[in-house]
Image (tube, grey):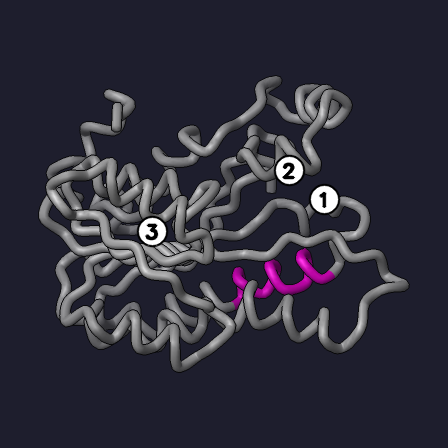
Amino acid sequence: MKLDSSLEIFRPEIEGKVAIVTGGSTGIGSETAKTLAALGAEVHFCGRNVEAGKAIEALFPAGNAHFAKVDVTKPKELERWIKKLPVVDFMVNNVADDTRVPWEKIDVDAIERAFAVNLRSHFLAIHAALPAIRKGTGKSIVIMGTSNWMRPEANCILYNVTKSGIVGLTHALAREFGPEFIRVNTFTPGWIATPKQLKLNMHAAEKRMLKREQALPVILYPPDMMGPILFLLSRASKAVTGQNLLGEGGKVMT
């Protein structure tokens, strides 16, 4: 994998460390897993797309990228995968389900599914990983949010409500684990041009809208998210915890 040269400054922080990435087989998660592995970390990442996960593994003949098919809505399955690791330095909780569901079609099953993927899975993953994180030296957790709940799009009620809860979870965990020097932050992308979004939702009109409404008139792609994520993982952000860092081109500006 060819790495953006600007990210090489993080190599001393990342090389030789152990990282977990949930939702790491596609989108921003896969870019995160690949970037961490390219910087020399031992990366354990999960997802549902086995073909994509195995393809990422194949990019790293040194064997430092390890894919596991895990259903994060199944607590015991998630816990078994994470608890295999005795030491963890970094954790990026990326998994999410942004399925558009109109208000009239929301039912109990849809609500429970949204909470299970977008909020509960992060809580359970961190709970399972904490003993290993305490033994690591990186001691940084990043939970991926979304700017959508700040300026909502139509039919995204379930996604927005559950993802907004990540900020509250981040605040609580940062306060709880601060005395142990474990940092917890949210990183909030905007509408990022992942292959999924380009196929399903981000067409010419949406691209024009983003360029018009963002302070930076550009379309953002997964590699553009790596600098902020690495910053939050590294000691360059050692004074930063309990924060929500936005990477959405200046559309929201909190």
User: Badge 1 is on which residue?
Assistant: 151
Of mark 3 and mark 1, the one earlier in the sequence is 1
In the rendered structure, are the residues bearing label 1 and label 2 in contact, judged by CB atoms less than 8 Å apart?
yes
Find residue 210 and report its horizontal and vertical position in percent. 68, 26
Q: Is residue 22 above or below residue 146?
A: below
| Quarter placement of the C terminus | top right
Indicate which label's residue lies in the foreground, 2 or 3: 2
CA–CA distance in space, label 3 to label 1: 25 Å
Find residue 252 and report its horizontal and vertical position in percent. 64, 38
Q: Which residues are magenta?
A: 158-168
Q: Residue at 32% of width from left, 55% of height from top?
A: 45
Q: Amino acid at mark 1?
A: Arg
- Residue 161 among those drawn in magenta: yes
User: Badge 2 is on which residue?
Assistant: 252
Indicate which label's residue lies in the foreground, 3 or 1: 1
Of mark 2 and mark 3, the one earlier in the sequence is 3
In the rendered structure, are the residues bearing label 2 and label 3 in contact, judged by CB atoms less than 8 Å apart?
no
User: Badge 3 is on which residue?
Assistant: 240
Of mark 1 and mark 2, the one earlier in the sequence is 1
Q: Residues within 10 Å of mark 1 (few under 14, many from 20)?
A: few
| Left or right: residue 108 compared with residue 49 | right
| Quarter placement of the N terminus | top left
| Left or right: residue 85 compared with residue 73 | left
